[in-house]
Image (cartoon, rainbow, N blue to C red):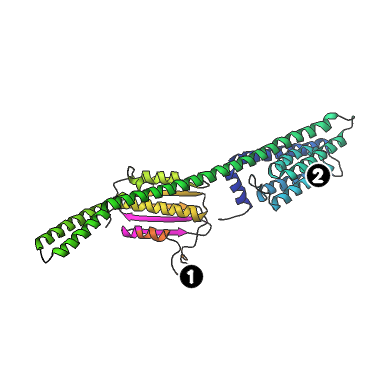
Amino acid sequence: MRSGPAAEAREVEWADPDGRWLRVVLDGAFLLLLGSSLVRFLTRDQSRTHTGYAVALFVAFGLLYVLGRLLAPAPRPGARPSARHLAWLGAVSAVWAGLLALAPSATWCAMPLLFTGLQTLPVRIAVPLAAVLTVAVVATELRLSHQGLNPNVVVAPVAISAVATAVLVHLQRQAARQRVLIDDLVRTRRDLAATERRAGILAERQRLASEIHDTLAQGLSSQGMLLQAADRTWETDPDAARRHMRDAAGIASRGLAEARRFVQDLAPADLADRTLAEALSALADRECGEGLTVGFRLDGMPGPVPERVEAALLRIAQGALANVREHAWATRAALTLTWLDDQISLDIADNGRGFDPERPRAADTGRERGHGLPAMRVRARQLGGTLTVESTRGEGTVVSAAVPLATP
């Protein structure tokens, strides 16, 4: 996938939607305070010899802040800030400190910087930064005080800074504890799902073993005994031998019926009481979670579909989504089932990292990597259909299966 500062910012906002609103509030407060500080400077605080320099610093301060928000995005919650973000925060703080020397009215622009630093920096860096900003604000207010010492000039900035620091540090630590708990829950859920899967596999193996033992194995044993008896009496009692052969043929016929029933029972369980569209919708819902969102869409008017086609398309969807989850690094996928006049098609698209379809073979063996795509192609080909794969590195993958409704 494409990467860069803008992509990083979008990824952080997607992972933490509430963080976007906090960023909007902080940026809006900064622009409002910057604008009001500039107006105050131009109307009351300006010095004739430094007006141009001060206005230039105001403009540079605002541009640096906005560009830094775009090019040096804040880290994800709990992640270490990047060197680019630290450099931006240091630069914007230095420009603000220089601006104070020419335009003391820019004092309260420190508030957005204070909250930005406390929100994104580790505590051991954020607290000293808050202290430095607070000292700069107090020193500037004292410099402007010409009518004696006003205690609020010293107490108010310190109190506001202390409250903001305590609250944000508490929220930061609480969020860290919540992330640990969430990680534990996700890991426990994954382990539980794996345990349930293993238990289900063992139970199904036991069921099939019992079924085969009680039907096919017993039938084959009886059939072998009858054939041996027929061989022993073939010369001495041809009628008995023929009777044994007929009985063995009957057992073989019943065993074939049992084998066909096993094959029928091994069809996808999702199709036992659902239509194909309902089964695909349920599959999409099950695959959602842990950073992957899967949607389902139905196009056209649904009609009757042969059972073989339903089973094959559902298996293709399951295999494609397994590839998406294991290899694509995707955050979104979509299943689209389309009914046409003479065929039905299924598209599985994702926004993952993609690959080069022209080089699907392993260099050392010459064979196609994995078993997923070859198995899907075989399923589609067996029904007289086709399976195509369209993919570009960094731009996702689309797997399309088209099967005629009148299967061979």
Residue corresponding to mark 2: 97
Relative placement, left or right, of 31 versus 330 is right
Q: Earlier in the sequence, mark 1 or mark 2?
A: 2
Tell me if mark 1 has few (under 14), some (14-19) or many (20+) residues whose alpha carbon lies within 10 angstroms of its own: few
Going 25% across and 54% down the picture, which residue do you hit?
Answer: 218
What segment is highlighted magenta in the picture?
Answer: 379-404
The answer for how far apart the CA atoms under marks 1 and 2 are is 62 Å
Residue 24 visible somewhere in the drawing: no
Q: Residue at x 59, y 41 (%)?
A: 181
Image quadrant in which the N terminus is located: bottom right
**Left or right of 113: which side holds 386?**
left
The answer to whether residue 295 is left or right of residue 237 is right
Residue 392 within the magenta-colored segment of the rendering:
yes
Query: Which residue is found at the position 74% from the left and 44% from the top?
Result: 124
Q: Nearer the viewer, residue 97 or 197?
A: 197
Is residue 320 magenta-colored?
A: no
Q: Could you tell me the amino acid type at mark 1?
A: Asp
Expressed as whole percent of the image width and height from the top left, the position of residue 111 reads 74, 38
* Number of disc labels: 2
Image x and y of residue 332, in percent: 50, 49
Residue 170's x, y, as percent?
Answer: 69, 37
Residue that carries the numbered disc 1 in the rendered image: 364
Look at discs 1 and 2 and give the one toward the viewer.
Answer: 1
Quarter of the image where the C terminus is located: bottom left
- Nearer-the-camera pick, 373 or 12: 373
Residue 80, placed above or below residue 136: below
